[in-house]
Image (cartoon, coloured by chain):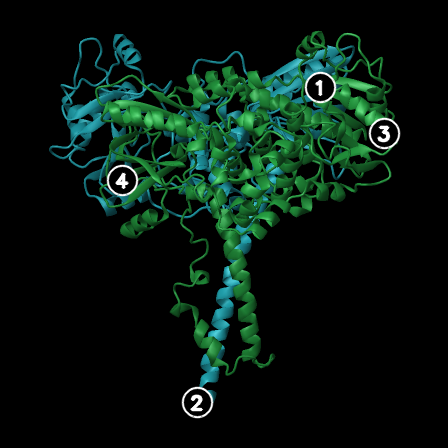
Amino acid sequence: MEHHLIRRVEYVKLLNTYPEKKSALGTLYLTATHLIYVEQTNNNTRTETWVLHHHIMSVEKLPLTASGCPLLICCKTFQLLHLLFQRERDCQDVFQSLLRLSQPVKEEELYAFLYNPHQNEVDRRQGWEFISVANDFSRMGLSNEYWEISHLNKNYEICSTYPSILGLPKNASVAVVTGSAKFRSRGRLPVLSYYHKDTKAALCRCSQPLSGLTSRCVEDEQMLQAISQANSNCPFIYVVDTRPKLNAMANRAAGKGYENEDNYSNIRFQFQGIENIHVMRNSLQKLLEVCSMKSPSMSDYLTGLENSGWLRHIKSVMDAGVFLAKAVCDERASVLVHCSDGWDRTAQVCSLACILLDPYYRTIKGLMVLIEKEWISFGHKFSHRCGHLDTDPKEVSPVFTQFLECVWQLSEQLPCVFEFNERYLIEIHNQVYACQYGNFIGNCQKERLDVRLHEKTFSLWPYLLKNQHLYRNPLYRRSLESTVLRPSTLPLHFKFWCGMYNHYDRGMHPKQSVLDQLLSLTQKQVEGERTMTELQRQLAVADGVLPDPSGPINTPAEQDGPSEKTPTAPVVQSNGSCAPLINGDAEEAGPGAEKCNEKEGADPGATEHDLTSSEDKPVSVETEHSKEEEQESS
Amino acid sequence: MEFAELIKTPRVDGVVLHRPFMPTVEGTLCLTGHHLILSSRQDNTEELWLLHANIDSIEKRFVGSLGTIIVKCKDLRVIQLDIPGMEECLNIASSIEALSTLDSVSLMYPFFYRPLFEVIEDGWQLFVPEEAFKDLESMTDEWRLSEVNKDFSVCPSYPSLLTVPKDIDDESLCKAASFRHGGRFPVLSYYHKKNGMVMMRAAQPLTGTNGRRCKEDEKLINATLCAGKRGYIIDTRTIAVAQQAKARGGGFEQEANYPQWRRIHKAIERCAGHPFQQRCAQSAYSNGKPRSEAPVFLLFLECVWQILRQFPCSFQFNENFLIMLFEHAYASQFSTFLGNSVAERVKLLLSQKTVSLWSWVNRPQELERFLNPLYEPNNLVIWPSVAPQSLLLWEGVFLRWNRSTKCLDEAYQEMAHIIEYNKELQNKVNSLRRQLAQLETEDSPLQTP
């Protein structure tokens, strides 16, 4: 069904990002779910580029040229495909098909509703139960003396975009809870995001109050009081409005706004100045223009990067996250965070603070829990923000991408504190947009329940866990586990994330990957340790120290043999013999989410090297190739 | 000795030293002929030993009688010294200024430095042109080692031994030299074994406005190409700059005179060859910068770093090695980067009077810090990406003093540990296999009666 062929067009050119490089010639296939480009090469190898329709952000027909009809496809994964058709009709056909296929109108048309990773119903159910927000509350120590798990919202009546279970201060009455909800935009009342056991300080989140110019609400004031009283370690709570002050003030005119310090006892109010979704959308747009420039000069690139404002925004999110973590950890103060609706900036900042405070969220599974808790269950509008369906383009914004980038920036500064590597973040990003699994479909829990997502689709998390060996950070050190992260947010620590925004421009990335090298070494280490134990046992048997469980001494010895006879055994290879193991396919190994086997020449950025010789092959990105070369030359 | 006149106040007590990311240290400041020293006289506090030669510029500030000197170093470090007493502070400042800008090379620290380590391998004997030529001879017989510049009279800024095409005699070399700026005639820089192609280097030809030509120069250049082959002449100036040079007697190769060659202009600000003394006299912070100064060597080191980042397994050395070279190029107890040419270095008797940087670096305990654990020897050509996205700020140099490197150092240690542990493990496994094999050969006769 899913690979049912819709169209096939031959003699399509795939233009290279680097104008000086040769373009590929091949055949284009459209299936119900994917665009597949198969390159015909001379030496009988097929290189396939797979693009999921859901990943396509825009398709644009460019003006006719002498060499054909160009079609530019931009993906939400930041992949760019520049195709050239021989015939106008083919181009128009593909253009129209892609417009339809890449912009489904109804949720049921999304890939997740027809994708089955060969699991039965039991697997499916277990998959969905694998990550549980309730378990995370228990892990934090809830319920306890001060906080409890409440089912007041079990029918989503208090707040339709909140989860069914909420962490609430024990001494907040039902009247206070419901009253506070009525005074908050969309009923998103102050609830627990994270409880910090050591300090008893709590991280809470909500939406803006409907304070307007003069309104106040006793229940809401009591709600904040209750949060404050739940932490005896600090006489006040911070109320953090993550918006720029100007934006918040503008909201007052519309009957919304921010807390008046005079009305709430013992609060310290603070703005954080993170811009809204529209500013972020435009900023990313500008950043991507920089990324897709053909042969830019250094100053084109640097000016473009600066003018996009992207890193400035990343820093503002990071600054706010660090502020929250410091308040909780150093001042032992509880913090209440909101923005406008409390589902974009609030989600970014709370989840970032969680990562800084709690090493659990820096593990592979912990990050899943965090995303499930702060983003999915608290109603970050994934469907709208990612543009899963053909809806209002003004709702689209890279809020979640920014969160992932903040985590990446942290991992660059603190390379040993995360259990996962960069590929994990990129894989999650790709999956968010792929809609292959159900996790990121819909805008809130209630919506997901209404379309019976858990019965009709599968969960992403078991799949990621199964492949976790690909996502491990070999430098991860558990001994650092207990520490609260204290990153520096000086501008010099923020870098352009080439691995994300130029992910598909392989030529720009380091040609030898330290990560791959270390991952293969840790794999070898496991094998080596196993072999060593086995050899020690055999030696003990041979020495007569141990009884031989498997018969005569020579049997195992013959099997294992002296090293010289078994040149294929991995342990016999000379140390560190792994030729640079560069294989970019790992992160695209999802079953059909995205396959891109594009083979790259190793010098796409090169314009002027080849002056003395055209015979020298560059160090290739393909392992076999390098070996071949080496043998030749030795 | 002369330095005593320059040191107005040799010692001040109660000086406070501020360094980024390090605790402040209070102690005694001492000035010697070559060092600024701050010692707390406590065992576990790090002392500061700063070569005057490393000081780029200083600023003075006063609050009441407390003076502050901001010292900006050539290695881009900025430190602050709080000095009680206005007079002391002024004296220290003017002494530092005088000592950090000494004119005479022979007053530099390398001439006074006596190594505390045993020189195992004399760095001065490390790079012998005759040895390098032997390697070349094993690959090709088209080149010879010429002594034409033995007394540095043909080209004062070239070394005494030069590799040139075999068919070009010394007389022609002299004529070609007279046609090249500074006598820097075309000589071999690199021979590419795989295809026999070469890189040669030279200064601009003195064509002048009349388009002067030199048969010997043309013959010399052509001698490196076999019939039918073509070559490139890379002029690292823009065409406009190259044109302007004609008016001053310089110029560029006319393609009509070098028919097998294509000239390409690649704009780079200045070309190497490399007068370390002039180029590295001051660094980034100095404002009264002489015209002859330029961070050319630093640019080269950074290019190597950029390639190292893209090919982390292809270099035997690590980033620390490059940073060390950067430091020593600007200020050092060793004299490897003193002087502007071989002739100057010979005249200064550097190899007799001073210690080579390589004598120190090549000791196993030092070398270890500079080895790249990821290195896997590989004789392939490497092609780095030059896309702007691929070129990063060299944080190891430019942000070195602006951030704490604790976490990055830990990551590096962890990486080195993983690699080291793996090697040990594989060695152990191999040795166990041998033991087992040995046991079996000893045992087997018993098993077969």
- Disc 2: which residue: B448
Instruction: Point out the frontmost of discs 3 and 2.
Output: 3
User: Is residue A537 visible from the viewing direction of this image?
Assistant: yes
Image x and y of residue A239, in percent = 77, 21
Look at 56% across and 78% down and name the residue there. Answer: A541
Give the x, y percent position of residue A265: 87, 19
Q: CA distance from mark 3 to mark 2?
A: 86 Å
Q: Dots 3 and 2: beta carbons under 8 Å?
A: no
Residue A185 — which label? 1
Q: Amino acid at mark 4?
A: Asp
Q: How far apart are labels 3 and 4 at the CA level?
A: 74 Å
Q: Is residue B348 above or below residue B376?
A: above
Residue type at mark 1 is: Ser
The residue to which callout 3 is attached is A172
Quarter of the image for the C terminus of chain B: give it.
bottom left
Contact between marks 3 and 1 (CB within 8 A): the answer is no
Chain letter, cyan: B
Task: Identify the residue at horizontal 42%, vertical 20% (top origin).
Answer: A298
What amino acid does circle 2 point to? Thr
Q: Secondary structure beneath disc 2?
A: loop
